[in-house]
Amino acid sequence: MSTTTEPQLGRCADCGRARGNSRTGWTPVTRGEVVVAYVCADCPHPSEPIRRIVTATGVRFRAVVDATPRGAHARKQATRTLQTLTAAREFVAEVRASVGRDGAYLRSSDTATVSDLAVRWLASKLGVRTVTREGYATALRPALAFLGTRRVSDVRKSDVQQFLAWALTEGGKRGGPLSARSVQYATVGLAQVFDMALSDGLVSVNPVRQVKRSEMPRQPERVGRALQHWTPGQLVEFRAAADRDPLAGVFRLSLSGLTRADVHGLRWSDLDLDRGSVTIRQGRVALHRGATSIDAPKSAQRRRTVQFEAMWPGSVALLRSLRAQQATDRLAAGPAWHDSGDLVLVDALGEPTHPERYSERFRRIATEAGLPPIRLHALRHSLAFWLHSLGVPPADCASLLGHRTDVFLSVYLPEGGETGAGNAAAALGRAIAAAG
């Protein structure tokens, strides 16, 4: 389009055609309330995301439309070069309508790829937390690496079977196999993506669901004592080692059953240091590429109040010390201090610390203390088994950890143990003996 600073009212501002006495089909280009140019009926208006280009074979129209999926962080554009301005305008309308209706742009069934469909499926997950949506995207990556460029209508059961074989042999990092659990997650996500294709009429059958369960990889279920955990003595050893760390008070909260998300979403206003309790009202989780997100707890059970001082006396003093240090840091930083919204876990400039740094700190303290390596989350497993060994009712254990009672039983006591089937059998035995 012409870049001259003088109004060119006698010619099309795009193609240069003389306007003459013609008025029909010519559209004004305004700046404020002033008409600064006109474009003819054969050229796109500057407000349209369409550019007229001249090629060796003639004039074409290139449309570049914003097609960022609903809720996505990265911008995405839909681009197409067409032979007529009408076709380009129809393409723009199609993209905008699709994004407005479906949350993402999915090309027609003739050209839509599995990756296109996955983007649209992810955009449709409006009621889930950001971290959950990112979890879906992460789970789908292996499947999209293998099938992403395939047209949706071309994918068959045999293609899914080939993906499974590839994933289990060379689909992981550096050409190694993916774990059975990762393959399961990818396949479950892919099945839901194709459920959308089925409901929209893009395919007549879901090829993923045609694969039999017996053909799917199985990950040995880790429940009960097979879960990573420390003994009570090892928990106490870790507490002694962590008490020498500047974040000693926060590690006391992790030892009280709070998750990593719980402690990273914690604000000073959520702590009652007079009573020695903490109320979980939000969580902060790690996202892709170093980002984090603050959201409500993942379930109603996670909203709870934990009496940490009753479990680990001295925790309040450690947290008061941390708060005093942050006040000193704030004064030293002056205008450079970042207002993090009262978060507890911040650095010397008030910036929220990344959750993975906390996990790394945990591993370093445990290693230096000579303790067996476990994940930070396994502190909750350790606490659950310790509580059970003390005879604490499962409902009370679940309340402390933010679980439903049935979930606590299925994860930590899958076989019932002495408090389950054994107690029931003993009670019946006594009743039968009395009746005899």
Image (cartoon, helix red, strand yellow):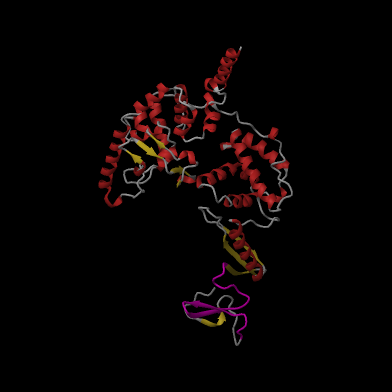
Q: Which residue shows up at 55% across the image and 27% down it?
A: 223
315 in relation to 13, above or below: above
Q: Position of residue 128 (x, y in %)?
A: 54, 47
Between 114 and 202, the one lying in front of the other is 202
Q: Position of residue 239 (x, y in %)?
A: 36, 27
Which residue ends up furthest to the right in the rendered image?
A: 204
Counting every numbered tag in the picture gives 0
Residue 42 among those drawn in magenta: yes
Q: Which residue shows up at 29% across the image and 42% down it?
A: 326
Let me know if residue 58 appears in the view. no
Between 135 and 114, the one lying in front of the other is 135
Which residue ends up furthest to the front in the rendered image?
A: 435
What's the magenta region? 22-49
Residue 382 among those drawn in magenta: no
Q: Which residue shows up at 67% across the image and 49% down it?
A: 150
Going by the image, does 332 lie left or right of 384? Answer: left
Let me know if residue 11 appears in the view. yes
89 in relation to 116, above or below: below
Q: Position of residue 42 (x, y in %)?
A: 63, 75
Going by the image, does 208 lie left or right of 336? Answer: right
Between 381 and 417, the one lying in front of the other is 417
**Quarter the N terminus occupies:** bottom right
**Quarter the C terminus occupies:** top right
290 in relation to 306, above or below: below
Which residue ends up furthest to the bottom in the rendered image?
A: 21
Between 172 and 245, the one lying in front of the other is 245
